Amino acid sequence: MIGKLNHVGVATPSIDESVKMYREVLGATSITDKWAMPEQGVWVCFVNLPNSQIELIEPYGESSPIHGFLAKNPKGGQHHICFEVEDIIAARDDMKARGATVLGEPRIGAHGTPVIFIHPKDMGGMLVELMETPKGDHH
């Protein structure tokens, strides 16, 4: 069912500070500029790795869903893990059929493809994002 690991989502109070850490401490050299996704309530940027990406997410606006996470984890931390799927609608229907709680309907994620989230209570305590495999090169 699931395809490759696309990215690990990391919530942060400051993308700029996180980027500095990934560059200076971990030696990352390929990092996208940050951009706003007001419809999702986040600022986003990606740290490109040879085999995956780290998605840095920072709250955008007062109603950002990331505020609650950062209230419990003030320094930030792993927010979600994202796997690719061939067909987001089929994945959504399969998750529901297996009894998993799908949070909302598919929407367009940071890679420009449809995504859904599966509730942590059904995923071993971890928020799981499923995203339709992007067409073409997305790294």
Image (cartoon, helix red, strand yellow):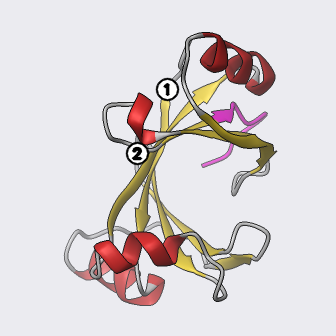
Q: Give the vertical position of 132 relative to 15 (above or below).
A: above
Tell me if I can see residue 113 in this picture: no
Residue under pointer 1: 4
Q: Is residue 106 left or right of residue 23?
A: right
Q: Give the vertical position of 113 relative to 72 (above or below).
A: above
Dominant secondary structure of the residues highlighted in magenta in the image: loop
Q: Secondary structure at mark 2?
A: loop
- Which of the 4 quarters of the picture holds residue 92? top right
- Residue 79 x/y as whole percent: 40, 57
Along the line of sight, the residue nearer the viewer: 107 or 102:
102
Of the numbered discs 2 and 1, the one sitting upstream in the chain is 1
- Which of the 4 quarters of the picture holds residue 28? bottom left
Q: Look at 47% across and 46% down and name the residue there.
A: 7
Q: Look at 51% across and 72% down and name the residue there.
A: 66
Rounded to the nearest angstrom, the CA distance separating label 2 from label 1 is 13 Å
Q: Give the vertical position of 103 relative to 64 (above or below).
A: above
Residue 134 in the magenta stretch? The answer is: yes
| Amino acid at pointer 1 | Lys
**Magenta region, residue range:** 131-139
Q: Secondary structure at mark 1?
A: loop
Q: Is residue 125 left or right of residue 88?
A: left
Residue under pointer 2: 50
Q: Is residue 85 left or right of residue 112?
A: left
